[in-house]
Amino acid sequence: MILVAQVSDTHFDLGARNAERVERVMAFLADLRRKPDAILVTGDITDSGKAEQYAEARVALAADIPVYPIPGNHDDRANFRTALLGEPAATTPINHAHRIGELTVALLDSSIPGEAGGALAEETYDWLHGVLADAPADGPILLAMHHPPVHLHSPIIDGITLADPDRLAALVAGDERILGVLTGHAHSAATTTFGGRPLLVAPSTASVLGGEWELELPGHVMDYAPDPAVALHVIDEKGGLTTHFRPVSMGGYLGVQPG
């Protein structure tokens, strides 16, 4: 079994609230009896891309477990590279792939500098084709990025999703090794299909965005009351994918024995 945790939309803003919520989630993951093999952070690490916000994120996201972040629309590629990856500043897409046991995880930079919506650059597709070519012929693959490539019935997100989703859908549908696609951006846990595979949207640690059905509630588009949450993706020995969305109480975790 391979266990991959997905944390998303942390929005570090130099305030105590968002940082404390991420620290609680990271403590929860560290205390699990079966710890994740890796933690993916699917974008909007910071609220406005400032170097100081990345310094805050680097401390809060530090773990004994490997942590693999990618940018979102609120991030700045240059500061992301220098503060989180220890690389020289550059504005080219930040794509990276990792082998986790038999699993290959390809993290795609769907951000467009200065824009809220997303797209995958030509160089990202070239890079992804190389990753798929190098991945084991019979090994499972997950794709992860920030922007969902589908309509989610969200009054905020549906106007700023991934552009040209059909191209990615064809790639996903054409490779049987791809188990699913992981995204963030929506600030709400959601599941659907894309290219014939599961599309799994992780919740935000910072807040929850309401759907179209909440529009008649004044001021209720963004909800800051719920506890932070994390997605836990399980890849079993037969190559099956199961996902749990887990809220993490800010009051701490109290283990209670059944019965």
Image (cartoon, helix red, strand yellow):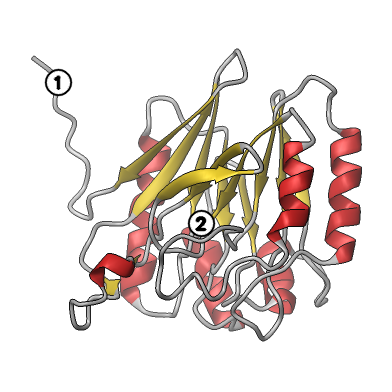
What percent of the width, then of the height, locates residue 239?
62, 19
Q: Which residue is mark 2?
A: 61
Is 1 positioned to the left or the right of 134 in the image?
left
Q: SS for tag 2?
A: loop
Mark closer to the observer (1, 2): 1
Could you tell me how far apart the alpha carbons at marks 1 and 2 are, in whole angstroms? 30 Å
| The one of 24 and 154 positioned closer to us in this rendering | 154
Q: SS for tag 1?
A: loop
Q: Residue at x 66, y 65 (%)?
A: 84
Specify the quadrant of the image occupied by residue 108.
bottom right
What percent of the width, then of the height, locates residue 45?
54, 67
Q: Which residue is mark 1?
A: 257
- How would you rate the neighbour count of disc 1 (Cα within 10 Å): few for under 14, some for 14-19, many for 20 or more? few
Q: Residue at x 91, y 36 (%)?
A: 133
Q: Is residue 234 visible?
A: yes
| The one of 72 and 46 positioned closer to us in this rendering | 72
Tell me which label, 1 or 2, sits earlier in the chain: 2
Which quadrant does the N terminus fall into? top right
> Please, is residue 50 above or below residue 99 in the view?
below
> Please, is residue 230 above or below residue 56 in the view?
above
Specify the quadrant of the image occupied by residue 254.
top left
- How would you rate the neighbour count of disc 2 (Cα within 10 Å): few for under 14, some for 14-19, many for 20 or more? many
> Please, is residue 171 above or below residue 186 in the view?
above
Q: Amino acid at mark 1?
A: Gln
Which quadrant does the C terminus fall into? top left
What percent of the width, then of the height, locates residue 246?
33, 42
Q: Residue at x 18, y 77 (%)?
A: 217
| The one of 54 and 3 positioned closer to us in this rendering | 3
